[in-house]
Amino acid sequence: MTSRPARWALRTIRSALVTGCVILTGCGSTASPLLAEPSPTGSAASSCQAVMAALPQQVAGLARTASTPLTASWGDPAITLRCGVDRPEGLTPTSRCDEVDRVGWYSEEFTEAWRFTTIGRVGYIEVTVPAVHAPASDALVDLAPAVSRMASVHPCQ
């Protein structure tokens, strides 16, 4: 027979494990797990609030599947957005800048996805588009009005 404090402790641990499983992995569901939350500061933080408030419910024809104060995802596999990320390591003053609807993007190609990070804004916004959702530019077009809410420092050159 288990004592009352031991039963309470087991129930608390079980509840924490279930909650952690849902937050971190989705526990086998097809919903996207939550993304790592960025931690922007200053004008990037306030600009991210405006960006997140303006995000569309659909991107590239896919419905929004998850969101936090600074992240959002659409579809499965998910197109993801994180606002207030760090500057990408590979981004240099001579990096190529692709402009989509007046938003400049630094692009990185991976085996199964493209990752785009804004250039010329007060903060960095990262969008990852799985290859199955090609062309990736569809997502960038849909996100441009919201991303444009982050103040521009200099245009894509």
Image (tube, rainbow, N blue to C red):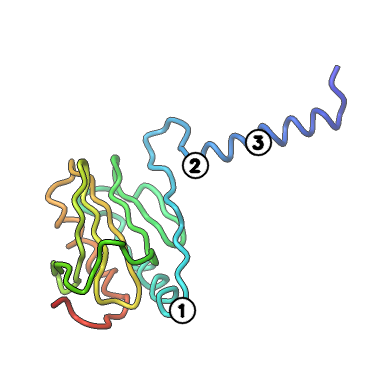
Quick one: which residue is furthest to the bottom in this view?
Answer: 153
Residue that label 1 marks: 42
Question: Where residue 94 is drawn, which disc sits there?
Answer: none
Q: Do the residues bearing badges 3 and 2 touch, measured as CB atoms within 8 Å?
A: no
Type of the residue with mark 2: Leu
Earlier in the chain: of badge 3 and badge 2, it is 3
Element assignment for label 1: helix
Q: In the image shown, does 108 or 79 lie closer to the viewer?
A: 108
Q: Residue at x 82, y 29 (%)?
A: 6
Q: Is residue 38 left or right of residue 11?
A: left
Does 118 sit above or below residue 132? Answer: below
Residue 17 position, x and y percent, is: 61, 35
Type of the residue with mark 1: Gly
User: Hey, which quadrant is residue 10 in on the image?
Assistant: top right
Q: In the image shown, does 88 or 151 lie closer to the viewer?
A: 88
Q: Is residue 64 left or right of residue 21?
A: left
Q: Do the residues bearing badges 1 and 2 touch, measured as CB atoms within 8 Å?
A: no
Q: CA distance from mark 3 to mark 2?
A: 14 Å
Q: CA distance from mark 1 to mark 2?
A: 28 Å
Q: Residue at x 27, y 54 (%)?
A: 58
Does 82 sit above or below residue 61? Answer: below
Q: CA distance from mark 1 to mark 3?
A: 37 Å
Q: In the image shown, does 104 or 73 lie closer to the viewer?
A: 104
Type of the residue with mark 3: Ser
Residue 136 position, x and y percent, is: 16, 53
Question: Where residue 15 is drawn, which disc sits there?
Answer: 3
Earlier in the chain: of badge 1 and badge 3, it is 3
User: Hey, which quadrant is residue 130 in on the image?
Assistant: top left
Label 3, residues with CA under 10 Å away: few <14, some 14-19, many ≥20: few
